[in-house]
Image (tube, helix red, strand yellow):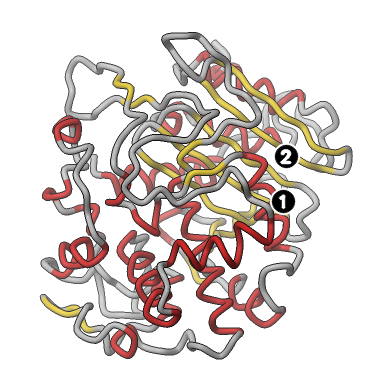
Amino acid sequence: MTLRTVRAALAAVIVAAALTAPAAAGAEPPGPARGHGHTRAALEAAVKGGVPGALAQAHDAYGTWHGAAGVADLATRRPPLPGDRFRAGSISKTFIATVLLQLEAEGRLRLSDTVERWLPGVVHGHGHDGRAVTLRQLLNHTSGVYDYTEDPRLHLQGKDYLDHRYDTWTPDRLVALAMDHEPAFRPGTGWNYTTTEYVIAAMVVERATGHPYATEAERRIFAPLGLRATTLPGTEPRIPQPSGRMYTVFPDDPEHTVHDITEFDPSWGWSAGEIISSTTDLDRFLTALMRGRLLPKAQLREMLTTVPSPDFGDGQDDGLGLFRATLPCGKEVWGHTGFMPGSQSMAYTTRDGRHRLVAHFHTDWAGDTDAAAHVLLAEFCGTAPPASATR
């Protein structure tokens, strides 16, 4: 299974699989979940299902709640802690979309601009044509640009990643990998979740501002919101403390050996997945975003304008760096999932920002047990995890 397939599967498990899940007996009516008992039970069920440890933060009308289960370190048995930092993966994309929309609000670019205008000759080859791809299409995954994480030269497809975990990649090289392949479709004629698009988007940010994308994200989002646990590590392989460990099992390993994969060079994910954060920081970011503190009304409206995302199933649409999902209980939530080796996360909120959930799993196989789906449904729909998940 390739990384893109795993990431797509993660999003599908969290939302699309949840859409077909029957409400368990004892479900609470949707609304504020005082006590968060079902969410706590879903975290514990994830651990019983094989996840080493899970951490969550929720906020509703009764205030903020922190929950955890299992261990953050299999060697020391240290539990997950509310202040822990972790790799938040593709939740990076929401940050980059926000920066790009801020630049649009300032009149420094337009979403209708072509990639070629900002990055001449970068999106070119094997059928790719930056003259036909707009910035909006990058952000809502309708550009058709090939996903470089599918290229075997990145060594993300199996156990040989262990031999390449400290390889350093530049954004130019990552995009060049994608250009060696044909696009998935002509721009604007389909939908395909592609990491390459957000690497290109961050390259546009750098061209438009003259600064590293990380500098712009820190100046525009991290500092104003006080996101002290959030960093963009570049090539740094370690996660700042406090943090737990991250565990993976490679699909091509017949022994199913659990590997501690905490340290690696995240530059292969760059702007599309390198971010490190905490549940508190991601919650604060989502709140500020939905309440209009980061974007003017016009740009927030653009971010929340969706297109169908058929790969992720019915009930989920794609905005600009955010997904919209309608859950079985009828509640609509907005957010994003994140995946990196050994780590997966999700951050979702209601449109008004009053009910929010951020969760992290100390492994990248939580999707195999539907753990993320059960936690999401437990918090927003008051649904107890099914009996099969607690055995």
Q: Nearer the viewer, residue 291 or 185?
A: 291
Q: Which residue is mark 2?
A: 381
Determine which quarter of the picture holds residue 278. Answer: top right
Residue 262 % position (x, y)? 36, 29
Determine which quarter of the picture holds residue 363. Answer: top left
Marks 1 & 2, CB-CB < 8 Å contact? no
Check disc 2: other Cα within 10 Å, few if <14, some if 14-19, many if 20+.
Answer: many
Q: Secondary structure at mark 1?
A: loop
Residue 91 shown left or right of residue 64 in the figure: left
Tell me which label, 1 or 2, sits earlier in the chain: 1
Q: Secondary structure at mark 2?
A: helix
22 vs 54: above or below: below
Residue 187 % position (x, y)? 31, 80
Q: Quadrant of the C terminus?
A: top right
Q: Which mark is residue 330?
A: 1
Q: Quadrant of the N terminus?
A: top left
Residue at position x 51%, y 28% from top?
243
